[in-house]
Image (cartoon, rainbow, N blue to C red):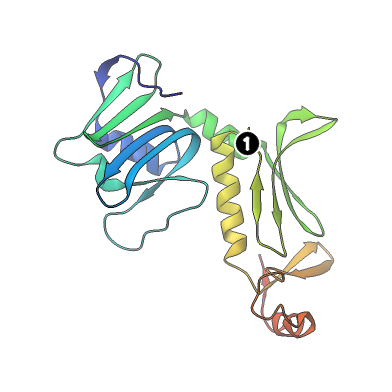
């Protein structure tokens, strides 16, 4: 789905940037070309991550990463398409198309996301949708590998919450994580941790560290 349509109205690019930083943009298509990396195309639905023009930049896996400079170039424009999407025209070799989420949609995503804590990993589900007699599964995070799997039909606004939570867990690799209120800690990243060659030693080392939140 290209989501271009006939462009009818313009939109302030600084307003679009604020929406992106607030987690209210979903990327549905993109195109770029340069002599160094060639052509890059995207079609799908991904939450947007804004990269700052200065300071540290974190390219987030699972996100549509876009620089804030694309929103304030000299020749760029933002157009509202007839289907409600917004195309950010950066220049002749770069454009992005977004769908804007309402504040209600963002808030509902937070309220509907359920995180189940199990012995081998975290299960992410949608409390608002029932499937096979249970909450609809959206994704799963494995403690040992620190790998996150997200279902293809996961709504982008919920995917953003899941990706951020999994990223928080991944940054605590080598620490212990309690899988229940009475303890039962597991070693995060035991399958990839540098001490994984000797898991007993890894456990002892991890026991010296605080339990991850």
For the image, the number of numbered tags is 1
Quarter holding residue 99: top left
Q: Residue 174 at what x, y percent from top left?
A: 65, 74
Q: Is mark 1 on a helix, strand or loop?
A: loop
Residue occupying the point 38% across, 36% down = 19
Query: Image check: 66 left or right of 197?
Result: left
Q: Is residue 136 above or below residue 117?
A: above
Query: Image check: 28 left or right of 140?
Result: left
Give the residue furthest to the left. 74
Q: Residue 25 at what x, y percent from top left?
A: 43, 35
Q: In this view, does 173 lie above or below 126?
A: below
Residue occupying the point 26% across, 46% down = 34
Q: Residue 55 at what x, y percent from top left?
A: 30, 63
Q: Residues within 10 Å of mark 1 (few under 14, many from 20)?
A: few
Closer-to-camera residue (58/91): 91
Query: Image check: 207 left or right of 6?
Result: right
Q: Residue 62 at what x, y percent from top left?
A: 52, 47
Residue occupying the point 69% across, 68% down = 188
Q: In this view, does 120 lie above or below 8?
A: below
Quadrant housing the C terminus: bottom right
Residue occupying the point 41% across, 32% down = 29
Quarter holding residue 32: top left
Say which residue label 1 marks.
Answer: 152
């Amino acid at each position: 789905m290209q989501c271009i349509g006939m462009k009818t109205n313009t939109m302030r690019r600084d307003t679009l940037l604020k929406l992106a930083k607030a987690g209210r943009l979903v990327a549905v298509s993109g195109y770029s070309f340069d002599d160094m990396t060639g052509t890059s195309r995207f079609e799908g639905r991904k939450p947007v991550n804004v990269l700052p023009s200065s300071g540290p930049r974190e390219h987030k896996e699972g996100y549509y990463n876009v620089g804030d400079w694309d929103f304030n170039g000299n020749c760029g424009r933002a157009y509202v398409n007839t289907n409600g999407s917004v195309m950010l025209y950066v220049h002749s070799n770069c454009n992005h198309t977004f769908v804007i989420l309402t504040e209600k949609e963002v808030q509902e995503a937070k309220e509907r996301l359920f995180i189940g804590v199990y012995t081998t990993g975290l299960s992410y589900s949608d409390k608002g949708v029932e499937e096979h007699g249970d909450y609809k599964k959206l994704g799963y995070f494995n403690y040992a590998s620190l790998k996150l799997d997200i279902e293809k039909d996961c709504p982008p606004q919920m995917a953003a919450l899941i990706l951020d939570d999994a990223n928080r867990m991944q940054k605590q690799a080598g620490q212990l994580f309690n899988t229940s209120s009475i303890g039962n800690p597991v070693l995060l990243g035991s399958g990839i941790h540098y001490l994984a060659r000797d898991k007993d030693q890894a456990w002892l080392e991890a026991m010296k560290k605080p339990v991850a939140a």
